[in-house]
Amino acid sequence: MAATNKFDAIVIGSGVSGGWAAKELTEKGLRVLMLDRGVMVEHGDYDHESKPVYEIPSRNIMPKKEEERDYFISKHGWVSPSQQRYYNNDRLNPYALEDGDEFHWIRPGAVGGKSLIWGRWSFRWSPDDFAANKREGVDGAWPIGYDDLAPWYDYVEKYAGVSGSKENLPYLPDSKFQPPMPMNVAEKWLKQRLETEFPGRKLINARLSNMTEDKPEQGRTKCQFRAQCDRGCSFGAYFSTQAVTLPAARKTGRLTLRPNAVVSNVEYDPKKKRVTGVRVIDTETKRAEIIPARIVFLCASAMASNQILLNSRPAGSAKSYFDNSGTLGRYVMDHLLKVGMNGEIPGMAEFTEYGRRPGGVYIPRFRNNAPNEDVGFRRGYGYQGSASRSPCRPVGFGESMKHGVRAYGPWLFGMQAFGECLPYEDNRVSLHPSKVDRFGTPQLQFNVTFRDNERKLMADARVQGEEMLRKAGLLNVSSWAGELIPGDAIHEMGGARMGSDPTKSVLNKWSQAHDAPNLFVTDGAQMASVSCVNPSLTFMALTARAANRAVKEMKSGRI
Amino acid sequence: MIDRRTTLASLGAMFGTALFAPIARAATATQPLQGAVGTPVFTSAQKAIVSALSERVLPTTDTPGAIAAGVPAFIEQLLGEWGLPGDVAPIAAGIAAIDARSRLDFGKAAVDASPEQQDALLTLAMNRQLPGVEGFFEIFRQLVITGYYTSEVGIAAEREWVPVPGSYDGSYPVAKVTKIMVG
């Protein structure tokens, strides 16, 4: 059959993971079809780049009626008129919740997926991030460790371009960095103050997939400090499918990219225990077809990959071909967001910033880095923040007010915590028994809640964050805490976790389905825990590693 | 995602006080819609007062003022797109009170009062000396400031817009700044 297939591999999804899968597989000689349910956005064909706010419709404010009609979930992911073409239309693509449940499934709606609109903070996991589940007896031991992934981190970082500072921290391994985005004068002051008052805690440069050096061999230019990354970047200064992995895959001449193509399920031969292709629906004509391939890389984004796996099942059966373990759709996680603090940094009034820098500074996790800390909860959190100056506050009205705001106010610093969520068996997604989408595919239903450990951890993040800013000497320090709603961090993960035991996990240590060796799931669905650091860099490394393995397996004839 | 600041969101820090609800909704964009008002939101008489008073809040000086910046139309657009039925009322009540006071003090409508007389009326409002409309001044001022500093005049004339800075300097001398740089 393979000889007659038009494609050796099908990659479902074109985001961070899908783009890497397409690049690696085509470069290794495979003919690849990459599918994405979203619209096509070519590199350089970005909306509203470099435009000031008054040239953007509605001064870049989402008109409320349109937002509530079509972007009522996307609004939690900072949709605005300048980039709304890249976001999901929530009216056309619904999902299901039971009464009282909450989940913000914030999705992109264009080729490139979230790589176009992501936050770009990029960290390696630590050795303990992989070890913690097993060490603590938490359900979900990782079948791989840091050393398995380290060479693949090296590999993807060098190509993608990650800026950051070398710190030699055991709990936050360094990447192969380009020079860091510099701290401003107020952040340098805060670093010195905070590290003096809190020995052992660090305030370091942001680690970002925003380049500080050119990559002429890829046609990419370093960051130009516009700070409008979410509109797309024609300089190719940040990692996106459009700027980085898609050009590489196209260069091989072996890539076919099909936008407007949503996958309902993976086709499976139960006798051979192999996937045989995918069923894809054209979102414009609604015509469905089955496209065969020798291997499939499922990179549709964590929850969409769960939906496709769950919906790959025998006719009339509710049970997926890939759920012999009974764990598919379970152990869904997200990072914890919505705790922040801010204050005024005294002095340095003679300086301000030139240029609009992406990112800022990072306070890495300091809780439970040593074993047996007694802080009342497991795992930890980090903070992302930045200092900047805004114009003075307006006083009164008229000429004196107008001319009074021609000066800068004090340096203001703000930061937000990102916390780790534990995996729970009953935090799950499933197919709704009756609700379907406009293509007839059962809607994904979310049943995910945060628990006691999550609430305690974020309560501590608020207390510690405020204390750090106060003791460092900031003025007018205040903190805030919003409701913890799963999905809000846009780091949803899990549901098809890796594991050594096929009775307790969906994928093996190569991101390969236990129940079908020619199916690889390399996006966030494979995660057995979530660390507290941003996940995309780890998806890149896992995808490149899985692609390498897949091609070896194909060459050896095993798949 | 920390850097996803918008011009509007940064206005929140600028006022240092509770934002008028439609501006806050515009800046944070997370509140559910509870009903919408259609545009236009003002009568022509109300429009004339809004226009005249906005120019006094941000007058023409060495740079253009609120009218040249299109602030009156922006206020209507903002209230139309973001306003809830209750949001227009305090503005309508405020300009009615100012108009009534103008007729009392100066014997003419607020739109016909001199700039100095209009300033005196706004000062009364600012000092909460217009009974029943004590909240009007801050709301109105926020609307004018928001409209002005998101306009071409506000961004490109009053302040400086650098589309492609090309580099970053985190200790840039304020002495070298002639106009505040905006994102």
Image (cartoon, rainbow, N blue to C red):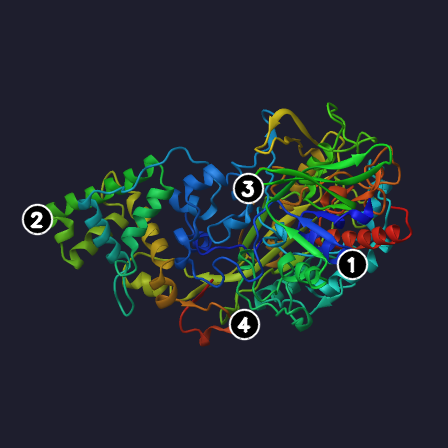
Q: Which mark is residue B144?
A: none
Is A51 on the left-hand or right-hand side of A465? left
Residue drawn 86% across the image and 55% down it: A147
The crowd level at tag 4 (other Cα within 10 Å; few <14, some 14-19, many 20+) is some
Q: Chain of mark 3?
A: A
Residue highlighted by disc 3: A284
Label 4 and label 1: CA atoms lie apart by: 29 Å
Q: CA distance from mark 1 to mark 2?
A: 77 Å
Q: Helix, strand, or loop for circle 2? A: loop
As shown in the figure, which amino acid type bears the numbered disc 1?
Tyr
Coordinates of residue B105 in the picture (x, y in percent): 11, 48
Callout 1–callout 2 Cβ contact below 8 Å: no
Residue linked to disc 1: A153
Residue type (three-letter) at the residue carrying disc 3: Glu
Closest to the observer, B122 or A4: A4
Subunit ID for the residue under disc 1: A
- C-alpha distance separating marks 3 and 1: 38 Å
- Comes first in the chain, label 4 or label 2: 2
Give the foreground label among 2 and 3. 3
